[in-house]
Amino acid sequence: MARVTVIVVTWNSAVVLPECLAALRQQEFKDFVVQVVDNASSDQTVAVVREFYPEARMLTNFRNTGFARANNQGIALAQGDYVLVLNPDVALTPAYLARLVAFADAHPAAGSFCPKLVRRPGGEELQEPAAGDGVVDAAGLCMTRSRAARNRGEGERDTGQYVLEEEVFGAPGACAFYRRTALAAAAVNGGIFDESFFAYKEDVDLAWRLQQLGMSCWYVPSAIAYHRRTFRRSNGLHHFSRLPTNVRLMSWRNYLSLLIKNERRQNFWRDAHHIVPRALAAALLLVATEPFHWRTLRDWQTQWPQLLRARRALAASTVRSPQELRRWFGRARSRQP
């Protein structure tokens, strides 16, 4: 049985997939299997997998079931100690899996791990960058007091400010390494990733759950991956307004779902003056810039019973107190060595 299962969810990913698969083949650590879950691609994605990585396990859906559900399908088929959730636009450096597995083995109480993600426009040789060479894409997830999720360090010139191994709020879904037993413990209503999210913020929801269950996430900077990033997480209302309509609506809806499921009452009242204005501002922006999708909002309301059941289940099994969780609700700063 392989120690690691690498899950790659694809949807019209033929352009970026060869680089991702080639990097997997170059891994120094060999004890892993690749599970591809294709969400009804209309391009040559399936043919690319069969050409570049024919030994990959392949599951093809007849429709786009969403990022969350497709990853759940892959996790259900996973084996071994660890699961790597990997976007097709991410390429791992050769030592990536070896370093993360070694670190995870040495930290058995942690539930998830994340690498240093570096932006890469493509066409460059895969090699480990020197300090000051390149732009940080993500050094883990962090949360503001308004409960907006951020990629820590996103867009910063890499000058060596993220070289320390340290705990972070969570792992970005583009390249997230999980202990399989931690995923099983975090399952709510039968799912690891919340399928009602479809896509966007499902990684934040899982990170929040793991934190409440007492399972830390570690940032491991010696494990490096390159991200071509076909979608950028929004930072603030200015960036939010530039997202496609369906992405804006889904992002706002999932933000509210995050709060319903995970927010503790004491922490909400402490930070309500940050949370409420952000939610209202996003709603007003949606109303002002386009016909508001009331049908989508009505459909989302039908999910409230499921969200509330998940909230009750999580509250019954939570380990960390609201006070312990507050350490994560504030803009993260880089730690100089």
Image (cartoon, grey):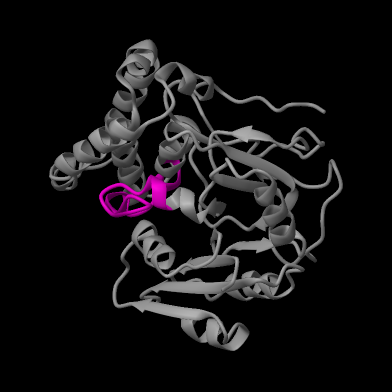
Above or below 25: residue 110: above
Please report the bounds of the magenta region as a residue range.
184-204
Residue at image coords 59%, 65%? 4
The residue at the point 40 percent across, 47 percent down is 185
Report if residue 241 is visible in the image. Answer: no
User: In the displayed structure, would residue 280 be above or below residue 132?
Assistant: above
Residue projecting furthest to the right = 130
Q: Relative to 22, does residue 324 appear above or below in the rendering?
A: above
Measuring from the top left, give residue 171's x and y in whole percent.
55, 44
Where is the N terminus found, in terms of image quarters? bottom right
**x%, y% of residue 55?**
57, 85
Residue 209 highlighted magenta (yes or no): no
Magenta-colored stretch includes residue 195: yes
Location of the C terminus (image quadrant) = top right
Against 148, residue 31 (above or below) is below
Measured as percent of width and height from the top left, residue 292 is found at 20, 41
Specify the quadrant of the image occupied by residue 165. Answer: top right
Q: Nearer the viewer, residue 47 or 163?
A: 163
